[in-house]
Amino acid sequence: MTKNSGTRSPETLEEMIELKAEMFGNRLTASIVRWFRNDTFFDGFRNTPARIIICTLSFIVLYGGLIVGWSTQNILLEYIIALLVVLVMQAISVRFVFQIEGREILDEYQTQRRDRAYRRAYKNIRSIIVAGVVGWLAYTYIRENADIELGGWELLTYQRAATIAVFAIGLISLQKYLAYGIKGEPFMSRDEVKKMRNS
């Protein structure tokens, strides 16, 4: 037996590692797909009443945080955390359809709803920008030409500017989830889920 017969060539070892990595990737992808399709742990987030509550909570956190943050100027970190919690709740309630790319995970209905939500969100953001520009022009005109005293740049502190920036980021981030709609998945009992899986 020669010295080289017991060792493998680097190409064979490399091919073997690539094959194992590919098999692991395929198994991982298959398990993720199965989990997304059959997950029942977060079902309480996905039905219609839950979607209504989560959307209402999103509006309360987004606009309420802006109002309280503007008034008190000391809740910026709490505002950011509350927005992140609401964003995670929204992502769970729509089965992460906006974070997933790949046709094998999403079914046709979810894909159509996601695409429609993207179109609506784009229109909403465009409308918000137009309304903001018109509001700014009206504010400037009223401030310069009327006898009404409106606050100016002196009201804008660093904390308030940061609060407005967080509000704008939250508003844009939430648009796709709010445009997805409040209709959730039908609520099924555990027995119904087991029957569906076994059929």
Image (spheres, grey):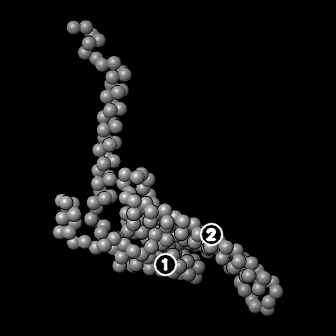
Is residue 82 at all visible to an observer of this figure?
Answer: no
Q: Quadrant of residue 145?
A: bottom right
Badge 1, how many Cα within 10 Å: few under 14, some, many 20+? some
Q: Which residue is mark 2?
A: 126
Three-letter amino acid code of the residue under disc 1:
Phe
Residue at x 34%, y 42% (from the top left corner) = 25
Q: Quadrant of residue 39?
A: bottom left
Q: In the rendered view, would you say 163 is above or below 109? A: below
Residue 156 location (% of width, % of height) = 67, 76
Give the SS element for disc 2. helix
Give the SS element for disc 1. helix
Residue 91 location (% of width, % of height) = 41, 65
Q: Which residue is mark 1?
A: 59
71 displayed left or right of 182: right
Q: Is tag 2's residue or tag 1's residue first in the polypeptide sequence?
A: 1
Quarter in which the N terminus is drawn: top left
Tell which of 62 and 93 is nearer to you.
93
Tell which of 112 and 150 is nearer to you.
112
Residue at x 32%, y 53% (from the top left corner) = 33
The residue furthest top is: 2
